[in-house]
Amino acid sequence: MSAITITKNNFASEVLQSDKTVLLDFWASWCGPCRMLSPIVDQVADERPDVKVGKVNVDEQPELAGQFGIMSIPALLVFKNGKLVNQAVGSRPKASVLALLD
């Protein structure tokens, strides 16, 4: 399953009300480390059907970035049962991204 675009309009239904673990990637098109992390996040989306993966463009969704205090990108946030349970900032290897989910 590929990553979905998360906006302020679908955040509650796709993240807070999801019965799956949700991995959110906060990114921007001008961010080099974001471009390095993006294919890894896409691989996780394809390989882990038990996880919903979403991407939040901070330039297009500044309200969501502000809501979670995103000051540096890329930032990964993990939600379970609608609650933030883990987060990490910066590009990282796939094993590190997968470890955030456990």
Image (cartoon, helix red, strand yellow):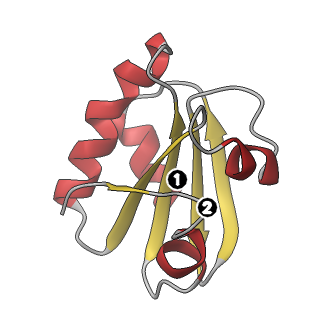
Q: Nearer the viewer, mark 1 or mark 2?
A: 2
Residue 69: x percent and y percent? 82, 43
Residue 65: x percent and y percent? 71, 44
> Between 41 and 62, which is closer to the camera in this rendering?
62
Q: Is residue 80 above or below residue 85?
A: below
> Residue under circle 1?
100
Q: Residue at x 60, y 77 (%)?
A: 12
Q: Residue at x 69, y 52 (%)?
A: 64
The image's mark for residue 8 is: 2
Residue 65 can be seen in this image: yes
- Element marked by disc 1: helix
> Between 92 and 55, which is closer to the camera in this rendering?
55
Q: CA distance from mark 1 to mark 2?
A: 24 Å
Q: In which quadrant of the rendered image does the N terminus lie?
A: bottom left
Quadrant of res 90: top right
Whether residue 46 sits left or right of residue 79 in the image: it is left
Amino acid type of disc 2?
Lys
The image's mark for residue 12 is: none
Q: Is residue 50 above or below residue 34?
A: below
Do the residues under discs 1 and 2 have CB atoms within 8 angstroms? no
Q: Residue at x 30, y 54 (%)?
A: 3
Q: Is residue 96 above or below residue 59?
A: below
Badge 2: few (under 14), some or many (20 or more) residues near its Cα, within 10 Å? few
Q: Residue at x 47, y 16 (%)?
A: 33
Residue 54: x percent and y percent? 42, 56
Amino acid type of disc 1?
Leu
